Amino acid sequence: MQRYVEFIVRRRRAVVIAVLSVTVLLGTQLRYVRIELRERNLLPQTHPHVQLHNRIMEIFGGDITLVIGVLPRHGDIFNPSVLRKIGRIAHAVEQQPDVIRDSVLSIASERVKLIRGSAEGMDVHPVLAEIPADDSAMKKLKETVLGEQLYRGTLVGADGSAAAIVAEFTDKVPYKQMVAQVERVVAPERDADTDIILGGSPVVGAAGDDYTATMAILFPIAVVVIALIHYEAFRTLQAMFLPLATALISVAWALGIMGALREPMDTWSALTPVVILAVAAGHAVQILKRYYEEFALVGDSAQAVVRSVTAVGPTMITAGLIAAAGFGSLATFGVTSVRVLGLLLTFGILSALLVEMTFTPACRAMLPTPGGTEAAREKEGRLLKAALEWIAGLVVRQPGAVLVGTLVVVAVFFAGALLLHVDNSFRNWFPESSPLRRADVQFNKHLAGTSTLSILVEGRKDGDIEEPAVLEAISDLEAFLVRRPEMGAVVSIADYVKRMHSAANADAPSFYAVPPTKDLIAQYLFLYSMSGPDDFISIVDAGYRQTVVRAYAKADHVEVARTLFDDLDAYADKRFAGLGVTVHIAGGSLGAETAMNESIVHEKILNMIQVTIIIFVLSAAVFRSLVAGLIVLTPLAVAVVVNLGMMGFSRTPLSLSTAAITSMAVSIGADFAIYLLFRLHEELTRTDSVETALHTSLLTSGKAIFFVSSAVSLGYMVLPFAGFSAWTQLGVLTALMAAVSALATLTIIPALIMTFRPRLFAVRAPAWRPEEIQLKRVSAR
């Protein structure tokens, strides 16, 4: 390490130029970094519910569906002005370049038809073939539409207070562009009498993109916050800016790699710059704190650089590799967004490590030698020194009390962890005051609901769905669903067939049932197909082998969904037994969100095991001691329990955003333990007392840990200012965990060493001392 650092210091100008050249090269790739949130990237693709959801979308469409709600402020939709609005909006949406034209549905669409009896037997015509010219005709239209089960709750509110226009988009453009296209259509139609709202996955994605874009504001704020903390740490400008320069270069490298890979930045990978900024700056602080210590001893800047990096370098490499491995463990998550976040953080931490081991010492060697005033200011900080002195005295004199107090804290927060619940509702990521949440309330109030459940009924051969027994079972399944209080509406091919049978028999209510023969059903379907555009493509395939039952719910709570799925499975097993078809439950948004919940719990446990093993193995290997590995894990385990307990007490759910906190925060917190143990290991070669070594380590490395944890915690605390609930939870909890990890490191580790006196941390003869380093080949130029 000494020879390596001597080389860096000798070639400092070349090293700085090389690092800056790489930065410029990767900077050219920043133009390819873009913001794009995709729902598929947030779902665990290996989960059966998600695979069913994807399969239904591939067969019947609806993967990227946007819903437009038209809500009159007075009266209902059944007046000429509102009906003309609906028609104009539907027609204009059909003309948008990225809309699948045949997918647009509204009461003004040709594909949305009424089935009525006639002299010929059955008449099929569009719902809104023309706008009624008088009140009598309008009243008749209202009675007809509101009496039609096929569209009540889905395309028109049960009381006529709202209408919906549904459009499906191709996947060729970002969500934000889709929403912008529709917004251009509906904006001119909004007026004092009519409110128009948007919902669906493109709206959620576009809102996520908007919040992600606020990182352009939050990141500079984080830079300023961390800069102020560094100034407080060093009280010198050059020592404040050097860690920031190191961190900003590391961020540029990570984003450049992201651009080179053409990987879009979504709501989670957008966190990468703040995380890397905090971690990279923290490592640089450790180097500079040691630099000022060594400079005070030798008075030569170049020699102080070599001595400090020789001493801290192995620690930094160890801590950096542990952090990178911890972040890399996120790549095992079954959710694409979290995997990408893990990989980008790994690239970023490794980039930071490389920059810190080259640019930071080279640049420090090029800067002017600290003057007496600067060196004196760096040593200031009486309050922090007094606090660390108090901690050192406490753990040395009363280590048993510290450990007992720790056990009490762990017990209290463990009780809170038992209250933890899982909830992955996408809409809950956004604040209640956001337009998306307000629109969601309106959709649930006036229409069938924004949560969907899709049930796939699959036959063995073409025509199986036309069997009367199968359609009757589907009809019974619908009735079973409609009785559930959380369901708003259910639609299937059975509804259309029953309506046709009634119409063919003079609209007699007694004939609103599944026809008795397959041939009669096939005749009805053939007659219906002659009425114009096919509107069955979203519920049944062309060969009548597969069909989907679409249900809409006003709630998406996991407990409700899980109970519903269990009840549906039991009912379907009985009702469809012996019919030669297979029923697949749990497609739609309810199934997808339930899959996320189940996967998050499983993968959270798996990831915690992975991170624990990584930290233990690497720590034990570096210190050549299993005991050291356990000591490093102890404060981290306490921080995890406190974190989970705080989530339980505050009713903060375990979700996609909070599931990644443990890996991120523990990977950062492990640095604190590694730095303290390395310093203690070193001090034990200089003194004949463990107590003195601990005291010195806490006053030196402990000071750096305080400022690093402060920078990490306050850097993360900029996230709540975005107003994005998912980031608020992640920012607050990660900041809490970093702070608890630092405090636990400064108290529990010394208490454990004082209590159990492991041989690894016994007083011993030194293998080498930093003061023995002699610079024979390094000039002070």
Image (cartoon, rainbow, N blue to C red):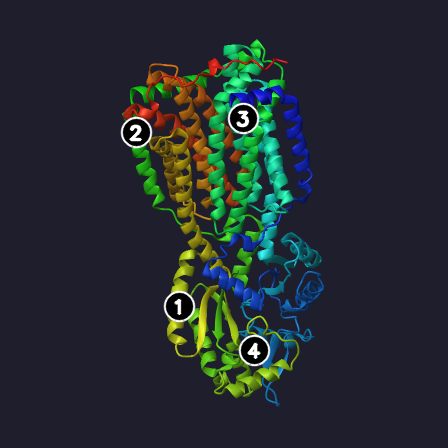
The residue beneath circle 2 is 403
Residue 39, horizontal then vertical, whole percent: 56, 54
The answer for how far apart the CA atoms under marks 1 and 4 are is 26 Å
The residue beneath circle 3 is 284
* Lower position in the chain sequence, tag 4 or tag 2: 2
The type of residue carrying mark 4 is Gly
The relative height of residue 646 versus residue 495 in the rendered view (above or below) is above
Foreground of the two, 723 or 144: 723
Dot 2: element: helix
The residue beneath circle 1 is 569
Picture residue at 38% right of the left edge, 72% below the top: 573
> Are discs 4 and 3 less than 8 Å apart at CB?
no
Foreground of the two, 121 or 582: 582
Residue 398, horizontal then vertical, whole percent: 29, 22
The residue beneath circle 4 is 543
The answer for how far apart the CA atoms under marks 2 and 1 are is 51 Å
Picture residue at 33% right of the left edge, 31% below the top: 627
The type of residue carrying mark 2 is Leu
The answer for how far apart the CA atoms under marks 4 and 3 are is 66 Å
